[in-house]
Structure formats: structure tokens, C-alpha cells
Image: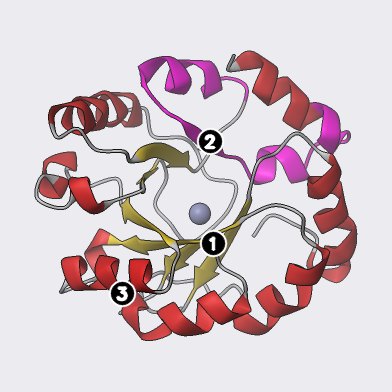
Amino acid sequence: MAADFSNLKQDVEMINQSEADWFHLDIMDGIFVPNISFGIPILESIKPLAKKPFDVHLMIEQPDRYIEAFKKAGADIYNVHYEACNHLHRTVQSIHQQDMKAGVTLNPHTPVALLEDIIGELDLVLLMSVNPGFGGQKFIANTYTKVAQLKELILKKDSRALIQVDGGVDSTNAKKLVDAGTDVLVAGSYIFKSTDQLATISGLKELTF
Ligand code: ZN
């Protein structure tokens, strides 16, 4: 979402060369969130250039409608919002049937405790640290508490789920997030607005080890 859409190839190659582990792709439908980003044709066009997994974050209503289509377009991780799914258990099963990792995302107002009966099925939980819809927003500090609560739930339920944080991640909060239990940091504007993107990614990784 934070990349230069007029020169996506260059940004994909930058990520290939960088120490980043995954591509994080923000899909927005203009209904679940106010903004519209991009969809399947963009994934299909960059997939052959990309050398790292595609982590697809679906900020759309009823994301179960597109599981197969995104798999065909190259998704490796299919990350749906808790708030957008009426039958989350079924959605997670469908994602696994398509041989993708299943992630569930919580908006800032959604309590971690709601995942109690699904956490054992999940590969990833994404905590939104801003309200989803736009890049470049300010980090919400309550996220640290949610990471700790989620870590506790994961341990209690013996879940394999990784903890991921998305929104306003930068050098001021990365270490504290990892110390609280975060496994995966999503950084957008912080990387793409920096003058030396490769060095910014390396710096973020160094901070968190
Ligand atoms: Zn995202």
C-alpha cells in the first residue's frame, strides 16, 4: 500500500534484495474500510517478480468469497478481519483447504479474548495498531497490552499462531513490540518514505534482535 504504484517493479525488486521476509499486500474494498487500494490483477502482475511469500491482508467484507481467487493470484497467507466474517471457523477451514496459511486480524477496538475458540486453528494473528484504511497513521499505544494478552492466550491454548502488528510501526516502537511478544512487524510508510529503504529495513531488523 505504501509502495510507488507508478513503479511497482522497482519496489518489488527492492524488497527482494532487502532483509524483509514477506510482502504484505493491503486489499481494501471501499466498504469494510473507506479506502480502495488494489486487487487481484496487481498481485498477478507482481507475483512472477517477487521472491518472497505474499501475506495478503483482506480489508474487505466477506473475504471468504475470494479465497480461491487470491490463491490463484499467488497468496501464501490469507489474512481476514474478525469483524468481516460471520462464520470465521468455516472461513479458516476454507483457507487451509486452499493450502494457504490462515491469519485473523483484529481492529484496535476488538478484544483479543474473542479469539479464544479459534486460536488453535490459526497460523497468524494480526493486531491493527491503527484504524485500517490509510497508510501513515499514528501508532495506538494500547497495542502493547494486546500483544501481551495475545501471547498469553497463545501459550494457554498451545497455539502455533504468530503475532503480527500492522500500522505506524517504526524505530520508536519496533523493539518494544518484539519484547512484548510480536513475531512479525509490518512496516509501510516508514520504509517507503525513507531515503535509503534497504538500510531502513536492515535497521528495523537489527533493532528487534
Ligand atoms: Zn496490512
Dot 3 falls on a residue whose secondary structure is helix
Total tally of numbered discs in the picture = 3
Q: Could you tell me residue 52's position as x and y percent? A: 70, 52
Q: Could you tell me residue 149's position as x and y percent? A: 20, 28
Look at 75% across and 34% down and name the residue there: 19
Q: Disc 3 designates what residue?
A: 94
Look at 46% across and 78% down and name the residue there: 29
Dot 2 falls on a residue whose secondary structure is strand
Residue type pointed to by label 2: Leu
Does residue 188 appear left or right of residue 97 in this picture? right
Determine if the C-beta at disc 3 is less than 8 A from ligand 1: no
> In which quadrant will I find the C terminus?
top right
> In which quadrant will I find the N terminus?
bottom right
Determine if the C-beta at disc 2 is less than 8 A from ligand 1: no
Which region of the structure is painted magenta? Answer: 171-199
Q: Which numbered marker is on residue 76?
A: 1
**Which quarter of the picture shows residue 102?**
bottom left
Residue type pointed to by label 1: Asp
